[in-house]
Amino acid sequence: MMKKVWKKAMAVTLAGSMVLLAGCGSKTTGQSQETESGQTTSGESQAGAEGGMATISVMAPQFYGTELKNDHSDEVIKKYEEYTNTKVEWRREANDTYKEKLGLVLMDKDNMPMIVTGSGDLTANVVDAAKRGAFWDLTEFLKDSESYPNLSKADPNVLKAVTVDGKVIALYRAREIGRYGFSYRTDWAEKVGITEQPKTPEDVYNMLYKFTFEDPDGNGKDDTYGLEMTKYVGPVDIMQTWFGTGNKWVEEDGKLVPVHQTKEYREALKWIKKIYDDGLIRKDWATVDSGTFGDACKKGEAGAFVDVMDGAKRIWNYYIQNDIKSVVDPTKIATMTLVGPVNDKTLATSGFNGFYLITKAGAKTEDDVKKCLHFLDKMCDDEMMVLADYGLEGITYDKNDAGKVVMRNTLEVQQTPSVGLNSVIAYIPNLNPTNPSLEKQESTIAQEEAIARNKKVAIYNPALGYLANSGVNAEVGTDIEQIIDDARTQYICGQIDDAGFDAAAKQWLDRGGDRLVKEVNELYQQDTAK
């Protein structure tokens, strides 16, 4: 049986010891070709701009391996090229090792893309590179509303998080504040007798236990888990907030403290370790490819999902697309319940998730910078947002009599013609196209309602702007963060105990964490606008 098999799985391989993956393969679809190095070129772009078109190069994460290489992707490429008057040389790197690869790319000036996409918040190696002058200062460019009617509307408060030494060194990718939360398969809950949405961690534990041991799919087999987990540790960050842990840092007695130093953090870890020890998540979760995240819920192997609300919506849409029947009423399609916060808490985004760096080694002149910004600005127009997020009319969506977009939902995300194009959309000033607008399905309405609930209680990172301007963080931040991330995984999996975690926390301090806390608090005290 599945759980018994996993009990014999090999010891957890930690993220810190992951081997960097090289890009592989070569495949051509339409006008897009991925080279053996993971780079994609459009048409004859490597030979130079054609017909007056600009040419730019972009490095971005690869989640599926099918980005802009599916049926009809050539039509998508043609549309964005003609609309933006720009050809793009794509360089895709595996998402699992993207941050590590980004660090290597920043040291390779001879092969630097013009635009480098970052994930999450500014990392220490990015800040360090910024302090050494690796990126263009976008401050004055973003004041030019005539040239950049969309990007010039960037939120000044969010821009603070991508400002280093007074210079705006990146363009952020806007996101909803309340994206993160808890979701579960509705019919499974009904099957095991749960009639109310979980409100506390104890409620969640009871649900996960029943999903694991009370045959929620009704097939008479011991083949389900409560919660889906992979080596992507976002769910751990979210679940920690349910215990009052905070978001990376927390304010205590007028000072900013890293959350791993709080008693709430350890309480959260003990709870997550318990769901691991009790078999409510798979034993090899820390080695499971993050590119498969969501698959266990789709395939009926797990019933609960902790991540972004749009991820839960995609699982729901998968049930619709694949006619997955409810286990309690086979005349109906299975659905997800998007709860959002637990214990009236959830993790906030920073108002953005990811960013675009325009590198001086890649974009060598101001004219090059303007080409990059022109492309990113045009990609924020409704026409391009519809193309990236909804796809092609007659292929992935139709329009109803009111002129609204009606999604067909016949293809999984990785099969759609435009998959991967949204990696170059900053979503400034709008998070969604305004014209045409989307005819909302039940799953989308549920997503928006959950986001609204999340937003009211989402917990922010109070140190975000200070970390971006911390010299110590630029020097040691990435390395010492890995110490805690590794120790957290080891603790959950029983490889170290409290003493072992305490030792890792001391190592964090000794390797620069004490200096980081001191500097962050100095910046915090100097901030008169806080």
Image: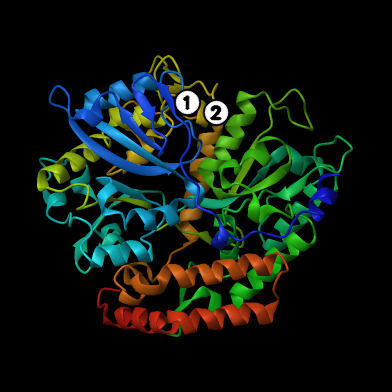
**Callout 2 secondary element:** loop
Percent x, y of residue 525: 31, 83
Position above or below: 478 against 194 = below
Which residue is depicted at the point 36% across and 20% down?
74
Res 343 quadrant in image: bottom right
Q: The N terminus appears in which quarter of the rendering?
A: top right
Percent x, y of residue 120: 41, 55
Q: How many marks?
A: 2
Disc 1: which residue: 416
Percent x, y of residue 346: 53, 59
Asked if the residue at tag 2 contacts the one at tag 1, i.e. Cβ–Cβ closer than 8 Å, the answer is yes
Q: The C terminus appears in which quarter of the rendering?
A: bottom left
Position above or below: 107 against 300 = below
Q: Is 462 situated left or right of 273 in this image? A: left
Q: Is residue 61 shown to the viewer in this render?
A: yes
Circle 2 residues within 10 Å: few <14, some 14–19, many ≥20: some
Q: Amino acid at mark 2?
A: Glu
Disc 2: which residue: 412
Q: Amino acid at mark 1?
A: Thr
Which residue is depicted at the point 57% across and 57% down?
233
Position above or below: 20 against 83 = below
Q: Is residue 84 shown to the viewer in this render?
A: no
**Callout 1 secondary element:** loop
